[in-house]
């Protein structure tokens, strides 16, 4: 059986007809769900029905949708490769996700839910005015389009690497199908297809874990190999922000990054807004944390298996097998599933499900933002519900096509996990900072918010582009080729040992000290990008707001949408301390955070 493995045969296994049937069903079933809801709800032509499911969706489908909306193929392909190339430190991001859920559920969600908004950027207009709202929504539209381009490319890469199917044809077919069923069925289709895709993802990952364990002789053996070859690292507490992955960067930096995804991102908030009460929305968010931790854990464990499976023959050494670490998981799946009918198809279904869920959620969300932030306020103030619904569907089609075009650009890039997180975090940090500044800094005004946003955006673009142009990277862990049983270009690789680097007893790479030739700020871990951008907005925003207060005083109306962070987290502190952070606003003038349950049909405006 081992002769079928790529490191023995020097060839990749291919899909069979059973695999195509399973894979095809993954694409056709969501389309069928979209068609079903389009027919069932054909007489319900309202934006509320299309964009937020009439705010009557159940807790479980919302929780499953929140779980997979950002747990895309980008992550499913990237996390196992992260363990193979580096170590298991990334596992700590699961704790950061749980902290992010806590912050999102109890700090940010109550603000937005009780306002009854469809677009989260409506809050920024209430707090800072139209200028800040437009800046923020433009930022998010660019961000989500770039992210959708990445996740549209990822499953197409998986299909290309195992079948050789034309990459552009694959990208186009996936993009067209997801655009089709999202435009047909709206939020209800998105939530129910996401629920199905969550199940497919978990089943696919468990299949990889079980079959991979059998292929390497048991998971305990794989764990021991990882320990011997320094892949098991859990306790790097180096506080330096230049360390790519440490406990601090993944828990604190990763937590803040995921809090921005879960707490103020339109994609997630729109799903949570479809719940009938705030309590159910919070429950859905907490349930999603279970799914996030499970998926991250499965991906990390699969990464350990991949390392054990290719322990003596690094496939990245030979471009005739794979050319990028993001192709490791597809290669591994085709190796271990070579003699098992339909399981390769389940793997492809797993990867494609990750992207389909992210794309459908993103397209539905961008249609809501365009309608609420641009079309209704500036073009069609008196637009009817029927026309608004038709227009929303047209927007889904338009942005689906635009995502396709951007996906072709992404196909020329390399490490999709790090690049994807870095690109979105560069834009996400300043955006998240606006919400933090508005919600928890009563002294902030529109002048400070605008100054903080542009300062942060310029700084993060400078750091991100500078790091990319200077080739800032972290050296990967050691690999071996002594188990590769073939000759390449006259050189016998059998018995050779080569490594990317060598490690000392504590598991850290021995690196030669050499002049960097670039600014140290470029070494900032990509995991810290969101946190850094947010902090800059808050700091500059407060300073500029205080300096400009006499020229642009805060109106009583805007202070109603802000609450001191100490009033929210530490209300038991002395009144003198709380008063300082309220910036001379009275508690009764601030936003009141109450636990009273108010149904959405009472508080929501007619959208």
Image (cartoon, helix red, strand yellow):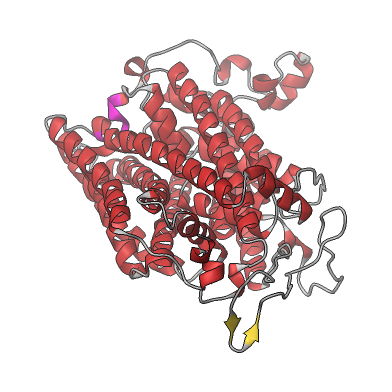
Q: Residue furthest front?
A: 1
Image coordinates for residue 528, horizontal then vertical, percent? 68, 49
Residue closest to the far bottom: 490
x then y, percent, for residue 172: 29, 62
Q: Is residue 52 magenta?
A: yes
* 590 in magenta: no
- Looking at the image, which is closer to me, 313 or 51? 313
Say which of 144 and 180 sits in front. Answer: 180
Pick whichever, 215 or 514, lies toward us.
Answer: 215
The quadrant holding residue 545 is top right
Q: Is residue 101 visible?
A: yes
Examine the image and state in which quarter residue 260 appears: top right
**Percent x, y of residue 152:** 39, 57
Counting from the top left corner in percent of width and height, residue 41 is at 16, 31
* Position above or below: 40 against 181: above
Q: Residue at x 54, y 76 (%)?
A: 319
Q: Residue at x 53, y 39 (%)?
A: 295
The residues colored magenta run 50-54
């Amino acid at each position: 059986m081992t002769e079928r493995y790529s490191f023995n045969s020097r060839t990749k296994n291919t899909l069979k007809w059973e695999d195509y049937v399973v894979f095809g069903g993954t694409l056709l079933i969501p389309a069928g769900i979209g068609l079903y809801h389009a027919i069932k709800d054909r007489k319900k032509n309202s934006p509320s029905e299309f964009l937020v499911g009439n705010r009557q969706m159940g807790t479980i489908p919302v929780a499953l949708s929140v779980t997979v909306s950002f747990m895309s193929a980008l992550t499913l392909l990237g996390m196992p490769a992260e363990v193979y190339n580096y170590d298991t430190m990334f596992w700590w991001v699961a704790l950061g996700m749980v902290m992010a859920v806590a912050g999102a559920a109890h700090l940010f969600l109550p603000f937005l839910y009780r306002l009854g908004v469809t677009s989260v950027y409506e809050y920024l207009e209430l707090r800072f005015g139209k200028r800040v709202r437009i800046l923020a929504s433009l930022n998010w539209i660019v961000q989500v389009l770039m992210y959708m381009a990445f996740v549209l490319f990822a499953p197409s890469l998986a299909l290309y690497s195992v079948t050789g199917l034309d990459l552009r044809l694959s990208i186009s077919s996936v993009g067209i199908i997801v655009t089709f069923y999202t435009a047909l069925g709206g939020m209800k289709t998105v939530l129910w297809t996401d629920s199905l895709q969550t199940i497919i993802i978990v089943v696919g990952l468990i299949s990889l874990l079980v079959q991979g364990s059998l292929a390497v002789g048991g998971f305990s053996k794989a764990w021991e190999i990882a320990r011997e070859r320094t892949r098991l690292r859990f306790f790097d507490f180096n506080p330096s922000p230049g360390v790519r992955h440490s406990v601090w960067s993944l828990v604190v930096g990763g937590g803040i990054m995921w809090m921005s995804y879960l707490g103020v991102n339109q994609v997630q908030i729109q799903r949570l807004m479809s719940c009938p009460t705030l309590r159910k929305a919070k429950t859905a968010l907490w349930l999603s944390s279970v799914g996030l931790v499970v998926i991250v854990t499965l991906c990390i464990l699969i990464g350990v298996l991949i390392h054990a499976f290719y322990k003596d023959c690094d496939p990245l050494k030979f471009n005739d097998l794979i050319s990028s670490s993001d192709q490791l998981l597809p290669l591994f799946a085709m190796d271990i599933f070579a003699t098992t009918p339909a399981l390769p198809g389940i793997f492809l279904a797993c990867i494609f499900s990750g992207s389909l869920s992210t794309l459908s959620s993103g397209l539905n969300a961008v249609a809501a933002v365009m309608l609420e932030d641009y079309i209704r306020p500036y073009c069609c103030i008196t637009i009817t519900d029927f026309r608004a619904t038709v227009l929303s569907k047209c927007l889904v089609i338009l942005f689906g096509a635009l995502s396709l075009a951007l996906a072709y650009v992404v196909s020329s890039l390399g490490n999709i996990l790090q690049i994807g997180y870095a690109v979105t975090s560069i834009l996400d940090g300043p955006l998240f900072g606006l919400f933090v500044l508005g919600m928890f800094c009563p002294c902030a005004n529109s002048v400070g918010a605008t100054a903080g946003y542009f300062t942060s955006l310029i700084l993060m673009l400078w750091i991100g582009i500078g790091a990319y142009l200077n080739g800032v990277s972290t050296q990967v862990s050691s690999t071996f080729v002594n188990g590769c049983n073939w000759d390449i270009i006259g050189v016998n690789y059998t018995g050779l040992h080569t490594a990317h680097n060598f490690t000392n007893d504590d598991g850290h790479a021995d690196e030669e000290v050499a002049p960097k030739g670039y600014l140290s700020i470029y070494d900032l871990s990509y995991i810290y990008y969101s946190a850094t951008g947010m902090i800059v907005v808050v700091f500059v925003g407060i300073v500029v707001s205080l300096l400009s207060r006499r020229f642009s005083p805060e109106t009583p109306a805007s202070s109603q949408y802000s609450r001191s962070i100490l009033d929210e987290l530490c209300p038991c502190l002395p009144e003198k301390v709380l008063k300082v952070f309220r910036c001379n606003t009275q508690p009764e003038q601030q936003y009141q955070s109450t636990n009273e349950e108010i149904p959405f049909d009472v508080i929501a405006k007619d959208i």
